[in-house]
Amino acid sequence: MRNGWILEPSTTIIPLTSRLSAFALCACLLALVLLATAPGHAEAADDVLRKVAVADPYLEMHTGPGRGYPIFHVVDRGDFVEIVMQRTDWYLVRAASGAEGWVDQAQMEFTLRPDGSEVDFARAALDDFTNAKWEAGILAGDFGGANIISLYGGYSLNPHVSVEVWGSQILGNSSNGWMGSVNVVHETWPDWRFSPFFTLGAGVVHTSPKSTIIQGDDRTDQIGHVGLGLRIYAARRFLLRIEYKSYVVFTSRDENEEIEEWKAGFAFFF
Amino acid sequence: MESRFRVLFLITLVIMLSGCAATKNLFGIGDDEAPPPTSEAPGQIIDPEVQRREIKEPAIDREDFEVGAFVGIMNIEDFGSDSVYGIRFAYHVTEGFFVEATLGQSEASLTSFEVLSGGARLFDDRTLTYYNLNLGYNVLPGEVFVGEERAYNTTFYLIAGLGSTNFADDDRFTVNFGAGFRFLMTDSVAFHVDFRDHLFDIDILGREKTTHNLEGTIGVTVFF
């Protein structure tokens, strides 16, 4: 059995009504993703589709966007195809005959623009892991004996330094809570596949005792933290992240509370 | 314990800052290095005047996101079965992996104890809401055939994740896992059949226990 991380005894009962907060968290995530993708879709509203010519001996069309789907149509060299849409690394293309099928990225690389120049279907790689401006992720772990689930979004000022905003829900045995913080991250070797980082930040933590605990009070305290971690490039836009943070909670009592946190999770850059 | 970590941090900080010092132009401020002076190529006599036609290529429509709603039945352990509804949002990272955020709501019926005792309720707010953040994998992509003429793409996926359930006046850390079937009616519209188990601890009936809360839903999603 885990121990709760609230230490301060008190004598009031506070009913919990934080159901809406779960909705708020997800709504924030949704808004963040929508904001990040909105401009791309505004451009794509154009009815004109991008046209490319097949430069390989042939272009294979699959029935679905995946390796296992069978090839049902082949477009010959020199013929033009229109790109209808893209999903992950697959492109839905329309041939002059009207046939529509999915072509993988590797084959699309061997197509030419109408003016004869090569098409660059940029694919995220280790280089983007180092230089991407935006990053967002989900981590979960242990916060002083309680469970913690965190969402974060980050912006890189340069490959070495980035600023992050975090929102976390803390779920303990004797108390629950929310935490928001802003931190600065420094990566000494951002071009490494296993890139260590150091972080420093501040924020607020709100805690409320569980309804079955008679003692306790709702509290909001300021926090400061330092941390260490590792960003690991996995594939495409995907990275894994593990980190340790040491928090100091500036309580109104004589002594400040110190909490250790371990977390692991995944993130994307774009 | 704490002092040991403090020493560890200081050592790491010193190492990292020494790394900082080695890094040029740390915050993007300061002078960039001037490029070496270029000398004019002596052989260039004729300056070719080629007029290139500016072609503005239309952007490719990326459809990696999926948003939709679902309805179904959820069995809350000890509290009977009731309808559940919610929304889901997914991002397809590769053809195999996707991440998903789900938000759902259900209602708790009366426990046998509450029915037999005739009116004594364990708690008043009977609404259960949950959110979870999941990682899914399309294990069995394939096709189904409807008649002789039509074929539809489908995927059987496995999914698991973490989240929180608000039930009986508390937020409860929740692990969920399950499987689903995605049926693509067109390339952008999908029909889902999903089955999940939500596990969380509850102590409302005396002692703390881990409960299995099974949920079966159907839903529709749109890719964008």
Image: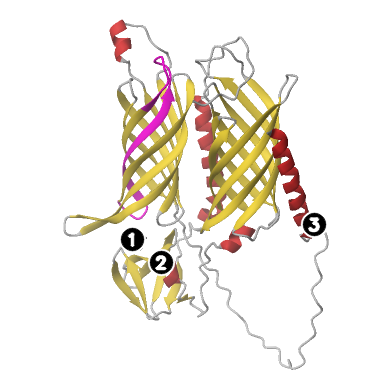
Q: What amino acid is at disc 1? A: Gly
Q: What residue range appears in magenta? A: B185-211
Task: Find residue B42 and report its horizontal and vertical position in percent.
Answer: 77, 92
Residue A43 appears in the rendering: no
Instruction: Measure the alpha-carbon separation of dots 1 and 2.
Output: 10 Å
Q: Which mark is residue B40?
A: none
Say which residue label 2 marks: A104
Q: Give the prevailing secondary structure in the magenta stretch.
A: strand
Left or right side of B6 for B189 = left
Q: Which residue does the image show at 60% across and 15% down from the upper left? A: A216
Left or right side of A187 for A75 = left
Chain holding disc 1:
A
Give whichever of discs 1 and 2 has the lower sequence position: 1
Q: What amino acid is at disc 2? A: Asp
Looking at the picture, do discs 2 and 3 lie on one chain? no
Q: Which mark is residue B21?
A: 3
B187 inside magenta stretch? yes
Task: Find residue B154 and report its horizontal and vertical position in percent.
Answer: 30, 53
Residues B157 and B4: in front is B4
Up the image or down, A78 lies above or below A18; here it is: below
Tag 2 and tag 3, C-beta contact below 8 Å: no
Up the image or down, A215 lies above or below B154; here it is: above
Say which residue label 1 marks: A64
**Around disc 2, counting alpha carbons within 10 Å, would you say few (fewer than 14), some (14 to 19), or many (20 or more)?**
many
Q: Which residue does the image show at 55% across and 43% down from the upper left? A: A264
Q: Secondary structure at mark 1?
A: loop
Q: What amino acid is at disc 3? A: Ala
